[in-house]
Amino acid sequence: MTKTLYVGNLPWATTEDDLVAAFSQYAQVISARIITDRETGRSRGFGFVEVAEADAENAIQALNGTLLGGRPITVNEAQPRRGGRF
């Protein structure tokens, strides 16, 4: 099983490889993605990292509030999307 972690307050220059490198120290990373603006292609400052379920809590505890690219990141378990588009 896997868990998806929300990663917020990312610097604009953060890449998916940067997320994998940061999280792989604490968890088995399945995938990582940075959310981008549809029109500009620029990062929206947050992303998601999918990790092995057994490693999720360890990664959250180890990385929440730490600096990545000079900014303190927020790491917690991702919540299901609110509402939906009609």
Image: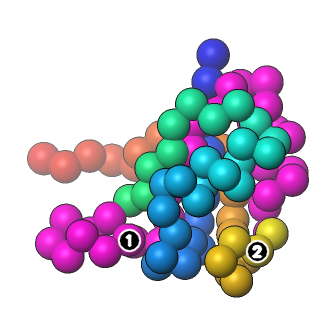
Closest to the observer, 25 or 4: 25
Residue 44 colored in magenta in the image: yes
- Res 57 → quadrant: top right
Q: Tell me the magenta residue range.
A: 36-65
Q: Position of residue 81 (x, y in %)?
A: 41, 45
Quadrant in which the N terminus is drawn: top right
Assign a secondary structure to mark 1.
strand
The disc placed on residue 62 is none
Label 1: which residue? 43
Residue 7 colored in magenta in the image: no
Residue found at x 33% / y 47%:
83
For this view, does 74 lie left or right of residue 41? right
Note whether residue 79 is visible.
no
Label 2: which residue? 67
Residue found at x 38% / y 59%:
35
Q: Position of residue 27 (x, y in %)?
A: 76, 36
Relative vertical location of residue 58 with respect to residue 8 in this rendering, above or below: above
Circle 2 packing at 10 Å, graded few (<14), some (14-19), many (20+), is few
Amino acid marked by disc 2: Leu
Residue found at x 70% / y 83%:
70
Q: Earlier in the sequence, mark 1 or mark 2?
A: 1
Assign a secondary structure to mark 2.
strand
For this view, does 86 lie left or right of residue 84? left
Amino acid marked by disc 1: Ser
